[in-house]
Image (cartoon, grey):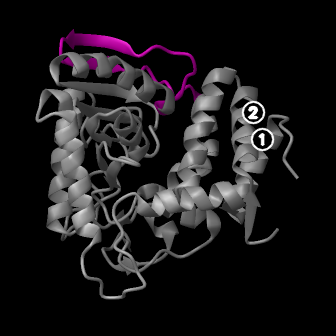
């Protein structure tokens, strides 16, 4: 097998959707899950893309993920929804939460939703992009229910919190302005991608169980495990710590250390803002566009290298990969083919 496989995005979506459908998920949900996973690959976020198919199928088999479940509303006010994802796929339940919050934001100017017991929601930027395309600003963060511990505190050797990513988005023309970052140096999924691909990690990502720098992704998943370093040292760890407290505490989910037997899942905190109720939608978008234009016009160190804003790389890669195909490393492609083959799904040539 070659080091990588190039596959057309439509073929990849069909393969992933067919695999989930063969595993018992409805065609409608399978299509939406595949759309989100492949879009992550199109944007260059392989850690949140089709590498997750095997993990999702394992959870589906064990009952950790379920298809065709409602978003259960446990509490509600005119501006708030407290929900339970009931182990549904994150790519499905996030759509339901967003659709439930938008009418509240339109009526009141902002709306907040939490969700516990939700499957992995994937790339956070996707949801802020979707809201931005509909004229809404947003703040989104998720945690792993106190179970997945990846990041050691500065000076520590044992992982204590998860990567606790945060995304924010603002409507703009032609595309929303969105930032999506982990509070760790890198997402845990990127360590897993490197492990599956048989590749080393860059220096500065990991420490082993003794607290020594390592580039071996296997050290992260060893017993005892290594840790991902926090983004920006104490600053990143402090941000991740507070996000864990907010999401776990407000959603009704768990913060580390979760009780024995707690199920790993995503807990979600999403705030949606309707700019029409603040300074006005036109004013908001004008300010965003003037700001981004001002930043792009900065004098450059290298005149041949344009100033890059959040989302530029993903947008450029999406256009390129839609045209030439999605690259998958040999390990991810083999794993995906194995999953599909075991379920009787034909592999594209």
Circle 2 residue: 18
- Residue at 32% x, 37% y: name it: 145
Crowd rating for badge 1 (residues with CA inside 10 Å; few <14, some 14–19, many 20+): many
Label 2: how many Cα within 10 Å (few below 14, some 14–19, many 20+): many
Q: Determine the residue positioned at 26% across, 38% down.
A: 137
50 left or right of 122 in image: right
Select label 2 or label 1 by which is in front: 2
| Labelled disc at residue 56 | none
Tags 2 and 1 in contact by the CB under 8 Å rule? yes
Which quadrant of the structure image shows residue 259? top left
Q: At numbered mark 1, what does the secondary structure look like: helix, strand or loop?
A: helix
Magenta run includes residue 86: yes
- Residue 329 in the image: x percent, y percent? 67, 64
- Report whether 222 appears left or right of 8: left
Q: Which mark is residue 340?
A: 1
Q: Is residue 210 above or below residue 18?
A: below
Q: Separation of disc 2 and disc 1 at Cα?
A: 8 Å
Numbered marks: total: 2
Read off the magenta span: 62-90
Residue at 74 percent of width and 52 percent of height = 8
Q: Is residue 319 above or below residue 125?
A: below
Q: Is residue 259 visible?
A: no
Image check: 295 left or right of 212?
left
Q: Residue at x 55, y 23 (%)?
A: 66
Residue 20 screen position, x and y as percent: 69, 32
Residue 196 counted in the magenta span: no
Residue at the extreme left of the image, as rendered: 279
Residue 158 place in picture, x, y as percent: 29, 61
């Amino acid at each position: 097998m070659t080091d990588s496989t190039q596959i057309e995005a439509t073929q990849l979506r069909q393969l992933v959707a067919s695999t989930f459908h063969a595993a018992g998920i409805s065609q409608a949900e399978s299509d939406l899950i595949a759309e989100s996973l492949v879009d992550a690959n199109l944007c260059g976020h392989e850690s949140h893309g089709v590498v997750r198919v095997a993990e999702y199928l394992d959870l589906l088999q064990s009952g950790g993920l379920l298809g065709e479940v409602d978003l259960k509303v446990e509490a509600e006010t005119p501006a708030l929804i407290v929900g339970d994802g009931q182990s549904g796929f994150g790519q499905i339940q996030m759509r339901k939460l967003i659709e439930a919050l938008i009418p509240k934001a339109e009526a009141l100017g902002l709306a907040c939703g939490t969700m516990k017991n939700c499957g992995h929601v994937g790339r956070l930027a996707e949801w802020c992009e979707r809201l931005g395309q509909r004229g809404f600003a947003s703040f989104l963060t998720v945690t792993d229910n106190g179970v997945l511990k990846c990041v050691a505190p500065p000076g520590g050797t044992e992982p204590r919190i998860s990567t606790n990513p945060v995304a924010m988005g603002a409507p703009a023309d032609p595309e929303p302005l969105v930032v999506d970052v982990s509070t760790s140096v890198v997402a845990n999924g990127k360590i897993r991608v490197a492990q599956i691909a048989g590749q080393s990690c860059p220096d500065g990502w990991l420490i082993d169980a003794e607290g020594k720098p390592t580039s071996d992704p296997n050290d992260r998943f060893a017993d005892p495990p290594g840790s991902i370093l926090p983004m920006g040292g104490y600053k990143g760890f402090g941000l991740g710590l507070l996000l864990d407290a907010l999401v776990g505490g407000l959603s009704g989910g768990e913060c580390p250390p979760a009780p024995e037997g707690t199920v790993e899942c995503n807990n979600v905190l999403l705030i949606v803002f309707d700019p029409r109720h603040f300074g006005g939608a036109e004013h908001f978008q004008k300010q965003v566009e003037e700001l981004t234009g001002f930043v792009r016009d900065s004098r450059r160190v290298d005149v041949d290298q344009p100033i890059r804003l959040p989302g530029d790389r993903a947008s450029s890669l999406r256009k390129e990969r839609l045209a030439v195909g999605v690259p998958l490393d040999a390990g991810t492609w083999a794993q995906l083919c194995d999953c599909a083959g075991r379920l009787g799904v034909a592999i594209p040539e």
